[in-house]
Image (cartoon, coloured by chain):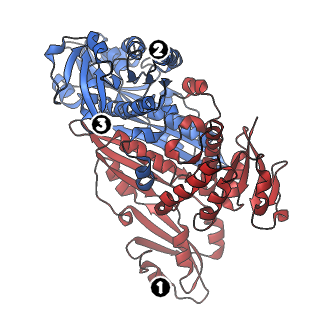
Chain colours: A red, B blue
Amino acid sequence: MTIKVGIVGYGNLGKGVEQAISQNPDIELIAIFTRRQPNQFSSQQNGVKFEHISAADSYMGVIDVMIMCGGSATDLPEQTPWFARMFNTVDSFDTHAKIPEFFDEVNAAAKENGKLSVISTGWDPGLFSLNRLLAQSILPEGTDYTFWGKGVSQGHSDAIRRVPGVKGGVQYTVPVEAVIERIRSGETPELSTREKHLRECYIVAEEHANQEEIRNAIVSMPNYFADYNTTVTFITEEQLKAEHGEMPHGGFVIRSGVTGQGKRQIIEFGLKLESNPEFTASVLVAYARAAFRLSQEGQTGAKTVFDIPFSYLSPKSGEELRRDLL
Amino acid sequence: MTIKVGIVGYGNLGKGVEQAISQNPDIELIAIFTRRQPNQFSSQQNGVKFEHISAADSYMGVIDVMIMCGGSATDLPEQTPWFARMFNTVDSFDTHAKIPEFFDEVNAAAKENGKLSVISTGWDPGLFSLNRLLAQSILPEGTDYTFWGKGVSQGHSDAIRRVPGVKGGVQYTVPVEAVIERIRSGETPELSTREKHLRECYIVAEEHANQEEIRNAIVSMPNYFADYNTTVTFITEEQLKAEHGEMPHGGFVIRSGVTGQGKRQIIEFGLKLESNPEFTASVLVAYARAAFRLSQEGQTGAKTVFDIPFSYLSPKSGEELRRDLL
């Protein structure tokens, strides 16, 4: 018996989930729900239907878990509470400041209807959060560091594309290696986000634009770039397509603590991802498995990664896990 | 209300637990149990009693969780099942091959008596196991690597001290950095343990011993050193004491996987520990908190790190964790 899932939203993340499901034989994709015309799409997987999002309710009792692949800004705040009334769900809601409110709303919707929703999976929030919690619990006296990158920042890429004379461009957030090495060697400096990261911009300029003006407009841009070490590199449109079309990302969570008479203990977790959306999708699928099992046990309401034992993420039995992985 | 704990065994690990408890205000140390004469000891913490291990049963109903600090070879296989009849327990049983059998025995003892036991915590088994499970669940197609060190290997240190002419010595297992870098950069070589690690020996020779003979005896020792790149460095007794008296350790768990059309995704977890026993002790204390809570909820039997959500390790509430760490 397979776990039957649906995908809501067919952008990069939804496509990543479709691919991730094909790596997990215990999970079966039933249908993909979109706000666009469903008949323009077809899945590489046999038997998968594309449906308009408004048809989702007809899949109640058929789909075990809905994997929510909309954006955190406007899609998920509406969609997850709505779907949580009808289905178990899993999402990657990532607006950190709004998580408590989102949790409460989804929790109420799911509980009232006997469903279970895992919110805010992915890697940050998600795997990074798990490591922050684990490391703090083991080393109560210590300092936490989170670094992001090297990876594309969508907000900063949008900002540089709004500069006059800029035709296209992409911004990478890059962790400062020298700072990471200081922490790994036992120092615990106080650091702001800007001291931990560089910003690298790759720009395609309009034909007659003044490159120096563009560079100055970017590096002096308040909030986005003014307080960072920012580099601006001008490239051709072909280079932008050929060399900057991917969505790599990653980062590090480090806790540097002390035990006993000042013994230094360092816990580090890191990700190096060639595809950010495909990795997030893979996390979603593992937590969809967990959502199904928790629901089968009769649990309801909203859960986060903090509430779920890792054994629920794996298709293997407890016995196999203890024998092969402990 | 504090969680009241006892320590069974007062070696390096037990002393580490005593220190770790002082970093956790919600946990109170009641008594330390030893097979030696208890009246030769005194704790730095107020009100802590030293008791002979045979007096443990008189603490039933007083101590919430017993933290088992004996060795895995002969102590824990006897002690954990015995104590699991009377108390919730947590241990760091680390004989990987015997975990299934140990689990069954402790599970039966704890279940029959309505107690809960968390077995095989620490970092390997323990945190490393958690990361193996997490990474495999998220990236079903991939390759796992575990590296240990730089750290003291007790078995190998014992072996070199048995070589004729050796007065004292210590052996460090050292991961091969060049191999780790290959994996981090996306290669997935097939590697045996010996290809991943070097062995560094620091030896104090007897006064008239032949150093070349000692060196040859070590590097050609079957099973222990013959198949490894082994270095032997002769030092003085003072150097051994001054520079090699600590118990550092650590290592890395890396999974290198692929998603979609061959996108490489790397998950890495690493520890850099100045004190191996103090760190293991800190993990034990966090899981003692979890054992208490699970028991309060009415759960019984043996559990491993795979079965326990991270929220149970922290003194913070679910609401605080979602707000501050997710």
Q: Position of residue A82 (x, y in %)?
A: 66, 59
Disc 2 target residue: B109
> Which secondary structure lies at badge 2?
helix
Judging depth in this view, the residue of A95 and A265 nearest the camera is A95
Quadrant of image for the N terminus of chain B:
top left
Q: Position of residue A311 (x, y in %)?
A: 57, 34
Q: Quadrant of residue A274?
A: bottom right
Circle 3 Cα neighbour tier, 10 Å, few/some/many (<14 / 14–19 / ≥20): few
Disc 1: which chain?
Answer: A
Q: Position of residue A154 (x, y in %)?
A: 56, 68
Judging depth in this view, the residue of A84 and A279 nearest the camera is A84
| Left or right for B115, reference A204 | left
Q: Nearer the viewer, mark 3 or mark 2?
A: 3
Disc 3 target residue: B1
Disc 1 target residue: A212
Question: Residues under labels 3 and 2: Cα distance?
Answer: 28 Å
Q: Answer above or below: position of B93 versus A238.
A: above
Q: Nearer the viewer, mark 3 or mark 1?
A: 3
Three-letter amino acid code at the position of disc 2? Ala
Question: Residues under labels 3 and 1: Cα distance?
Answer: 65 Å
Q: Answer above or below: position of A230 versus B269.
A: below
Three-letter amino acid code at the position of disc 3? Met
Query: Is residue B189 something one can see in this rendering?
Result: no
| Residue drawn at x 29%, y 32% as measured from the top left | B278
